Amino acid sequence: MDRQPVLVGALVTVRPTVADEFGALYTVASDPAIWDQHPAHDRWQESVFRAFFDEGVATGGMLTIRDTADDAVIGATRYAPAGDDAVEIGWTFLARSHWRRGYNRELKRLMIDHALAQVGAVRFSAGVDNHRSRRAIEALGATPLPAAMVERGGEMVPRVLYELRRP
């Protein structure tokens, strides 16, 4: 599957992340409120975000999210392999100025449509206590899967898993 697409919507444009976008992405990610329900609640700290950013660029699935209206960097997301005929969408964060305004929904719809044209299933993973992300995933119509322990940042953490299958 092409994990480095350019996707364009009315609200968001998504492009492969490049190393020189660290500053712009960290400006968004440095808001502690973005991470308050996230298992990596310290990701607003520069050293923690640097490790997250470097891993995302190195694995080849990180995408920068820009506001289509003014091309401003408003966040990032990723595609990651998720087994046979599936891809995971996750690691998404958006500037709070773009919350509850349709940006995340359009982003996920663009990503899901791109993925399901190439694989049979899209999977999502959210922290057990990340109710904001879980509500957003559920609003997409994803089906809950059994909870699991997954490796994140070198440690095993409990996650709630979801899936959307190609019709």
Image (spheres, helix red, strand yellow):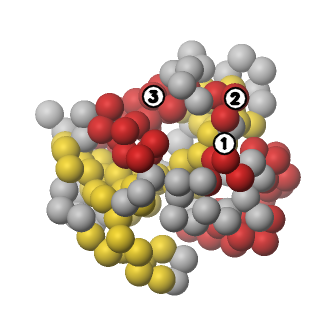
Kindly state the secondary structure of the residue where label 3 is placed.
helix
Seen at 54% across and 48% down, the residue is 92
Say above or below: 72 vs 157: above
Residue 133 percent coordinates (x, y)? 44, 45
**Occupied quadrant, residue 110:** top left
Q: Nearer the viewer, mark 1 or mark 2?
A: 2
Amino acid carrying label 2: it is: Ser
Seen at 23% across and 57% down, the residue is 85
Q: Quadrant of the C terminus?
A: top left
Residue 122 percent coordinates (x, y)? 30, 48
Q: Earlier in the sequence, mark 3 or mark 1?
A: 1
- Camera sees residue 55: yes
Residue 35 percent coordinates (x, y)? 61, 54
Question: What residue is shown with label 3?
Answer: 105
Residue 9 percent coordinates (x, y)? 54, 21
Q: CA distance from mark 3 to mark 2?
A: 15 Å
Compared across the picture, whether 93 is left or right of 50 comes to left
**Occupied quadrant, residue 94:** top right
Amino acid carrying label 1: it is: Gly
Question: What residue is shown with label 1?
Answer: 75
Q: CA distance from mark 3 to mark 1?
A: 14 Å
Say above or below: 152 vs 147: below
Amino acid carrying label 3: it is: Arg
Q: CA distance from mark 1 to mark 2?
A: 11 Å
- Camera sees residue 56: no
Question: What residue is shown with label 2?
Answer: 97
Q: Earlier in the sequence, mark 3 or mark 2?
A: 2
The residue carrying pointer 2 sits among few (fewer than 14), some (14 to 19) or many (20 or more) residues within 10 Å by Cα, namely: few
Say above or below: 122 vs 155: above
